[in-house]
Amino acid sequence: MNFQVTVLKILVSYPDGFAVMADLKRDMAILATSGRDWADRTKRLAARVPDLDIFSQGLVARENGGWKISVKGRTVLEFMEAHPVADQAIEMVPAEKVEAPLLPAERARRRRERRARRREGRERARANAS
């Protein structure tokens, strides 16, 4: 499992991209034990940006007992997740060279809806666990 890609994926799923350390650790534990698929996926994503360093590149900031993903972090993650055209080779680009495009309103709305569904699922799981 690629730690840095996993941190980006976890943070992007939280409202405002911020998660306290306890939530990060819990989500990391869940993903680390979720099987080989997650580890393979994070390796593939990390291969798109081989020199990834989430803190020194300003993709994630430490704030108030937690971590927060930056706009640049979201952009780099979107770049890593972009599906290449079948005939083209995967382009490897340093994280510093990825430019931040503006998110269309529809894409932002869908992202908010996905986050809300994930948050509701986590809340249901917590309620069922107690």
Image: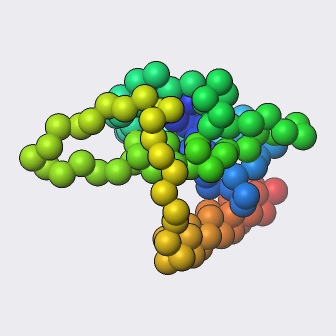
Name the residue nearer the viewer: 120 or 126: 120
Q: Quadrant of the C terminus?
A: bottom right
Residue at (54, 76) in percent of width and height: 105
In this image, 130 relative to 72: left or right?
Answer: right
- Residue 37: quadrant of the picture: top left
| Residue 72 image-quadrant placement | top right
The quarter of the picture where residue 41 lies is top left
Q: Measured from the top left, where is residue 76 in percent x and y?
A: 49, 43
Count up the numbered dots. 0
In the image, residue 32 lies at what x, y percent?
55, 32
Image side of residue 18 versus residue 58, left or right? right
Rendered position, 106 above or below 36: below
Is residue 29 at least partly visible in the picture?
no
The image position of residue 104, as x and y in percent, is: 49, 72
Q: Position of residue 68 (x, y in %)?
A: 73, 44
Q: Residue at x 79, y 34 (%)?
A: 62
Here the colouring is rainbow
Q: Nearer the viewer, residue 13 or 48?
A: 48
Residue 81 visible somewhere in the drawing: yes
Q: Hey, which residue is sitting farthest right in the picture?
A: 64
Q: Residue at x 84, y 39 (%)?
A: 63
Seen from the viewer's position, the closer of residues 116 and 121 is: 116
